[in-house]
Amino acid sequence: MAVRWVRGVTALALAAVLAAGAAGCADDDGGSPLDRASAAASAAASVGSDVASAAASAASRAPEVLASATAEVGRKFEEITDGVDARDDVALGTPVTDGETGRTLVEVTVQNSTGSERSFIVQVNFHDQDGSLVDVAVVTVRDVAAAATGTATARSTHELPSGVTADTGAALRF
């Protein structure tokens, strides 16, 4: 995603250089077209460098964001003292991108197979196209009636690349 952005800025910079050169042919302010094109190229290179630096900075923070999200999920699961493994009672929908926030959403459906009302906590892992873990979310489905299903929506903590997949990392019924 960052690579496409950098390529787009590079193309924009090239267009600025060409436009400056073309404008220089019709301008009569004393500077040569070559001088103006050189100045435009220098400015474009500076912008491209800034964009590349910002993209690298964002990429370097990705492990921090993932570590923070994973730690938060761990804290939520530690709060449950009487939980039973319920991964087999969880089904996930297909991840979609929220058009307003850019975050990835996935519907979580739980099946309460017990004879009394229960709640569920579910860890949803998001993976990129290479299978690398890129985010973790936790969702609670409260007060699911006996022998019934309940749903909730898990949301990524940040924008994720297109083509992500989701799986159930952990689930507890309590």
Image (cartoon, rainbow, N blue to C red):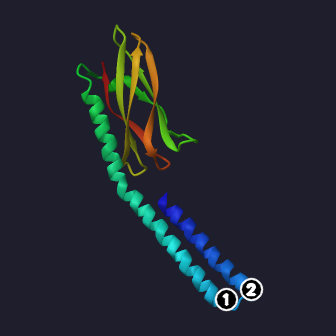
Q: Amino acid at mark 2?
A: Asp
Is 158 in front, or is 24? 24
Residue 135 figure quarter: top left
Label placed on residue 47 = none
Query: In what quadrant of the picture does the C terminus appear?
Result: top left
- 3 with respect to 57 (left or right): right
Label placed on residue 27 = 2
Dot 1 falls on a residue whose secondary structure is helix
Residue farthest to the top, as pictured: 115
Image location (x, y in percent) of residue 74? 27, 35
Residue in view at x 73 percent, y 87 percent: 25
Image location (x, y in percent) of residue 45? 52, 76
- 137 with respect to 84 (left or right): right
Q: CA distance from mark 1 to mark 2?
A: 8 Å
- Category of crowding for the residue at label 1, using alpha-carbon neighbours closer than 10 angstroms: few (below 14), some (14–19), many (at least 20): some
Image location (x, y in percent) of residue 57? 39, 61
Image location (x, y in percent) of residue 90? 38, 26
Residue farthest to the right, as pictured: 26
Label placed on residue 33 = 1
- Category of crowding for the residue at label 2, using alpha-carbon neighbours closer than 10 angstroms: few (below 14), some (14–19), many (at least 20): few
**Residue 167 sits above or below residue 45 on the image:** above
Q: Amino acid at mark 1?
A: Pro
Residue in view at x 74 percent, y 86 percent: 27
Residue 11 figure quarter: bottom right
**Residue 76 sits above or below residue 161 on the image:** above
Residue 111 figure quarter: top left
